[in-house]
């Protein structure tokens, strides 16, 4: 890559349109990508920041089958939700497209035909998994089985979500159809393969040698593992009826593999943007002076570092990524975020429930970004970071500066007198921050960069606390003017430096400081180079709070919402035990079930699960050993009415003869409950017929 970077082509992973965007997507991909794009734009760089809805994935067809609608209806619904959520949240895409767009179908088809005509594919008849009941071949996500690497029993046909390994569907152990649950058979079908093994030497040089030092450890490590294991040809077509038809003769009923189709969406989105803006798209993808970056999650590393670059190399006229700064996963309240289980914080719902607080979520997700390891989002941390950092540090500093300037000088930036050593030291320290923050951003260390931004606000707070202008105004007005002048320079710097991280806050602060009224609004580099950002005599506006305190009630509402989702999911996914083999009426009449009352209960010594009960069955008082000690204490069940099977042959358990069985069942969330023996007043010994 040339050191003379003329432009930046920044891509963010295309979200599947089978559901809305959640905070895991934001933390892993979209917030860091947006920070980087905004940062480059502030410096006057030529940026194309593109994304779009991935509308051809198998999860979409699965969603459509579940909801009883067409795949097109699914993608139309979620594309609209996702696009609006990104806009409202302030993700500054230059273009957000979709893979159902005509320009994308044309671009992907042309790309495939170019490789096909250049002889870059191998054509093979192979055995693929086939569901006879559904009458169709099973694409990757239509197959579930045991991962051959980690043993996870619900791995998909193309990737294990437990260990992250990518594989072929035929590698799965005990595969089954996600459509019917049937065990698939192997059936011959013809497909076109990209021979990744032919690009192995090039990939070794490009990744393992050229990018050993500047790529993230997790990205480099996963790529090295793949390459060291030996690359194999990868099918780029599928037997499906949803997707882009394979654009050659003899390929009826086949579509492009979604991971061939989807990354080309970055190219088609750039084309769409360039056409709209009257630009030429090709330099952004074909000029060596362009820096191509893919922001993704760790589950997409192999596709963006092995498969897509091999496709670009095979085509011959494209540049390849300069970096792929993939993040790890973000968990939620200690559990893995799951779309299917509704264990997530959905962006569109957050925007409704926390209006005008986009930057709070951006800040928290960046402060806790899973850059090097999986991290956990908790609502308590969200509240604490807002109240203790954004409100108490950033907001507090700005509020004091603006209020004091309006109070003492009617909003005019005062003329400083002689600078003291602390004034000069503070201004020099301020001028060093743009380079420090920029260095962290350029190395994709966004947590570190945002922390340095907050250090600017801390610098301002400490300066005001030490110099106390509210006291000097009574004794030394000239000193007060100097202090507020310096503080206003810090406030102005925050308005500029916060823009990549907190764009809504930056805009609000610029409005308060009336930046737009200056001849030239300050830019990133001005913070370091200009002698002053807010000149003497400039008039600022009235103060308003940048951030609001988040109350305990708001957090409790979110926690209750999550728990409700968990219970609903458990109820929906509760499995009902299949019916046992048929018995005769006479078999049933042999069971003698009675109403009884627990008179005594104590824990079985050295047994974790067992309680020893004395039960009045109406015909006698007998000992019953029951495995319920992990669900009930002895004290809480004394006096409890229960249903007892009394004619069960005695059985010795740890030296105690158990003379019956208490009837129990489980709730959907796994809690043991007693089978209700009937209305109050039913006597012990009453039979259950």
Image: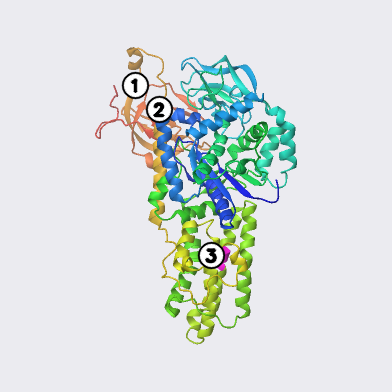
Image quadrant in which the N terminus is located: top right
Question: Relative to 542, does residue 353 appear above or below in the rendering?
Answer: above
Q: Give how far apart the Cα atoms at labels 1 and 3 are.
A: 79 Å
Q: Is residue 457 magenta?
A: yes
Range covered by the magenta-colored residues: 454-458
Q: In this rendering, which labeled residue sits more in front, label 1 or label 2? A: 2
Question: Relative to 410, does residue 234 appear above or below in the rendering?
Answer: above
- Disc 2 residue crowd, few under 14, some 14–19, many 20+, Cα 10 Å: few
Image location (x, y in percent) of residue 395: 47, 65
Mark sitting on residue 494: 3
Query: In the picture provided, is 399 more to the left or to the right than 127?
Result: left
Q: Which residue does the image show at 44% across and 43% down from the upper left? A: 83
Mark sitting on residue 70: 2
Residue situated in front as seen by the camera: 269 or 477: 269
What kind of secondary structure does the magenta stretch mostly adopt? Answer: helix
Between disc 1 and disc 3, whose residue precedes?
Answer: 3
Q: Secondary structure at mark 2?
A: loop
Question: Relative to 469, does residue 428 appear above or below in the rendering?
Answer: above
Assess whether mark 3 and mark 1 are in contact (beta carbons under 8 angstroms): no
- Disc 3 residue crowd, few under 14, some 14–19, many 20+, Cα 10 Å: many
Between disc 1 and disc 2, whose residue precedes?
Answer: 2
Query: In the picture provided, is 319 more to the left or to the right than 653?
Result: right
Q: Give how far apart the Cα atoms at labels 1 and 2 are.
A: 54 Å
Q: Which residue does the image show at 32% across and 26% down from the upper left? A: 594
Image location (x, y in percent) of residue 41: 56, 54
Question: Relative to 589, does residue 69 appear above or below in the rendering?
Answer: below
For disc 1, the marked residue is: 592
Q: Kindly indicate the quadrant of the structure image that contains residue 114.
A: top right
**Which residue is farthest front?**
278
Q: Kindly indicate the quadrant of the structure image that contains residue 210.
A: top right
Q: Secondary structure at mark 3?
A: helix
Mark sitting on residue 74: none
């Amino acid at each position: 890559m040339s050191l003379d970077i003329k432009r930046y082509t920044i891509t963010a992973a295309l979200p599947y349109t089978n559901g809305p965007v959640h905070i895991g997507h934001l933390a892993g991909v979209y917030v860091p990508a947006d920070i980087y794009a905004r940062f480059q734009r502030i410096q006057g760089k030529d940026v194309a920041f593109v994304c779009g809805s991935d509308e051809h994935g198998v999860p979409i067809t699965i969603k459509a089958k579940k909801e009883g609608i067409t795949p097109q209806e699914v993608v139309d619904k979620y594309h609209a939700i996702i696009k609006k959520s990104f806009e409202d949240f302030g993700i500054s895409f230059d273009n957000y497209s979709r893979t159902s767009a005509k320009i994308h179908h044309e671009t992907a088809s042309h790309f495939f035909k170019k490789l096909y005509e250049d002889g870059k594919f191998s054509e093979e008849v192979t055995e693929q998994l086939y569901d006879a009941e559904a009458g169709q071949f099973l694409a990757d996500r239509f197959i579930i089985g045991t991962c051959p690497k980690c043993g996870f029993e619900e791995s998909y046909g193309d990737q294990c979500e437990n260990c992250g390994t990518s594989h072929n569907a035929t590698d799965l152990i005990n595969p089954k159809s996600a459509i019917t649950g049937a065990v698939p058979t192997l059936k011959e079908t013809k497909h076109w393969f990209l021979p990744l093994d032919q690009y192995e030497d090039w990939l070794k040089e490009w990744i393992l040698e050229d990018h050993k030092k500047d790529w993230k450890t997790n990205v480099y490590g996963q790529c090295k593992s793949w390459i060291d294991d030996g690359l194999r040809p990868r099918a780029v077509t599928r037997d499906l009826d949803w997707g882009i038809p394979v654009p050659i003769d003899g390929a009826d009923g086949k579509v492009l593999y979604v991971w061939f189709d989807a990354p080309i969406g970055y190219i088609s989105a750039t084309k769409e943007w360039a056409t709209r803006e009257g630009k030429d798209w090709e330099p952004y993808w074909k000029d060596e002076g362009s820096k191509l970056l893919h922001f993704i999650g760790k589950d997409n590393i192999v596709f963006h570092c092995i498969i897509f670059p091999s496709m670009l190399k095979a085509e011959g006229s494209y540049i390849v990524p300069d970096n792929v700064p993939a993040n790890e996963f973000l968990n939620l309240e200690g559990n893995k975020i799951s779309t299917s289980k509704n264990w997530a914080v959905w962006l569109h719902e957050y925007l409704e429930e926390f209006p005008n607080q986009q930057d709070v979520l951006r800040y928290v997700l960046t402060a806790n970004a899973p850059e090097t390891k999986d991290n956990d989002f908790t609502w308590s941390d969200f509240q604490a970071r807002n109240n203790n950092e954004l409100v108490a540090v950033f907001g507090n500093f700005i509020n004091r500066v603006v209020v004091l300037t309006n109070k003492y000088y009617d909003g005019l930036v005062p003329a400083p007198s002689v600078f003291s050593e602390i004034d000069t030291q503070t201004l020099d320290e301020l001028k060093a921050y743009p380079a420090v923050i920029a260095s962290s951003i350029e190395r994709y260390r966004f947590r570190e960069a945002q922390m340095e931004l907050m250090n600017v606000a801390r610098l301002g707070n400490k300066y005001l606390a030490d110099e106390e202008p509210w006291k000097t105004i009574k004794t030394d007005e000239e000193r007060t003017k100097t202090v507020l002048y310096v503080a206003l320079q810090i406030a102005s710097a925050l308005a500029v430096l916060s823009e990549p991280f907190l764009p809504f806050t930056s805009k609000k602060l610029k409005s308060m400081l009336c930046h737009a009224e200056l001849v030239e609004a300050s830019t990133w580099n001005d913070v370091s180079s200009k002698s002053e950002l807010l000149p003497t005599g400039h008039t600022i506006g009235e103060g308003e709070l940048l951030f609001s305190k988040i109350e305990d009630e708001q957090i409790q509402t979110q926690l209750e919402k999550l728990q409700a989702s968990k219970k609903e999911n458990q109820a929906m996914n509760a499995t009902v035990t299949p019916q046992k083999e048929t018995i005769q009426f006479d078999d049933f009449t042999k069971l003698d079930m009675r109403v009884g009352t627990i008179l005594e209960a104590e824990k079985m010594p050295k047994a974790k699960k067992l309680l020893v009960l004395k039960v009045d069955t109406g015909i006698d008082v007998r000992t019953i050993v029951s495995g319920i000690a992990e669900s009930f204490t002895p004290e809480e069940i004394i006096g409890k009415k229960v249903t007892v099977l009394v004619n069960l042959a005695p059985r010795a358990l740890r030296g105690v003869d158990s003379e019956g069985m208490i009837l129990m069942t489980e709730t959907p969330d796994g809690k043991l409950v007693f089978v209700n023996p009937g209305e109050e007043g039913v006597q012990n010994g009453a039979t259950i017929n």
